[in-house]
Image: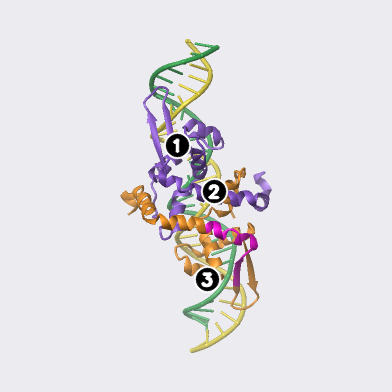
Chain colours: A orange, B purple, C green, D yellow
DNA sequence: GCGGTAGGGGAAAAATTAATCCCTATATGA
DNA sequence: TCATATAGGGATTAATTTTTCCCCTACCGC
């Protein structure tokens, strides 16, 4: 795993939540786990744009940050289930606020975002 | 400026808000501008860990995304003031929710974050 | 034995983001 | 005259994150 070379800022609440939520797929992982998609293969199907690899890495980080727990069933073929910890559950309303703002301003956001990357990116 | 090579995901509200809010210092810039620190030099003093350069770049992105506006006074020495657009103002309650969750869980977050980077990073 | 399913992970490359360094300009005050 | 404050930007390097590619285990059914 990659080892940080620079100490992150941990001054205020915004720094702290940033540390655990940054990561391209983390918020969605939390969201889908909360919706009941608890197995790795289900999550991979819900987030097809991410590779298995990244999801595993980010799931591991969420676990290290105590937002989710991983239960491995000693069966064959292997079965794994993730679930939110109580701590992780308290994040759901927060994520909900983010998603609602994004949904409410969907058209405008899409427009301003695309305006900045028009030329070659498609 | 760096030109993206890969089209970002813009499927849902979470993707969209992520696009405009990701960036190490953006949330704090919005927050401080809202608190009345409107001039570049004031913002730099409020966020001493960031270099002038990055702040300028991220301010420019916030401006492109229509979250803030930049007013340049034609005086010498130069004077510039940023302010939130109406659109940007609607983000303040959202940022507030993020910050509150982080503040409320400050100790636990600091602990789990530090646990992951103990060894060499200090 | 082969292919499918379920769950992983190492190594290296590519993409992206942030930090460094150095340079521009003018006015004011010591 | 020299340092300081104000605002900004190009070029380069470093740091970090995400992707790609390839590999592994074990069982089941055919």
Mark 3 touches mark 2? (CB < 8 Å): no
Q: Tag 2 or tag 1, which sits nearer the N-term? A: 1
> Does A89 appear in magenta?
yes
Mark drawn on residue A61: none
- Give whichever of D2, A36 is nearer the camera: A36
Q: Given the image, what chain letter belongs to the residue carrying mark 2?
A: B
Q: Distance between the residues labelled 3 and 2?
A: 35 Å
Q: How crowded is mark 1: few (under 14 residues within 10 Å), some or many (20 or more)?
A: few
Q: Which of marks 1 and 3 is in front?
A: 1
Could you say whether the residue bearing mark 3 is in a helix, strand or loop?
A: helix
Q: Which of marks 1 and 2 is in front?
A: 2
Q: Given the image, what chain letter belongs to the residue carrying mark 1?
A: B
Residue A97 is at least partly visible in this image: yes
Q: Is residue B88 left or right of residue A117?
A: right
- Rendered residue at 32%/50% (across/down): A118
Determine which residue is flagged by label 2. B96
Mark drawn on residue A41: 3
> What segment carries the magenta color?
A80-95
């Amino acid at each position: 795993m990659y080892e940080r070379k620079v100490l992150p800022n941990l001054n205020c609440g915004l720094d702290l939540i940033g540390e655990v939520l940054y990561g391209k797929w983390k918020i969605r992982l939390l969201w889908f786990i909360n919706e009941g998609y608890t197995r790795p293969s289900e999550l991979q199907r819900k987030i097809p744009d991410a590779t298995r690899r990244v999801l595993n890495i980010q799931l591991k980080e969420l676990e290290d940050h105590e937002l989710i727990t991983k239960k491995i069933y000693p069966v064959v073929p292997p079965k794994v289930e993730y679930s939110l910890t109580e701590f992780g559950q308290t994040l759901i309303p927060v994520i909900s606020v983010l998603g609602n703002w994004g949904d409410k301003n969907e058209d405008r956001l899409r427009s301003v975002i695309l305006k900045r990357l028009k030329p070659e990116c498609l």
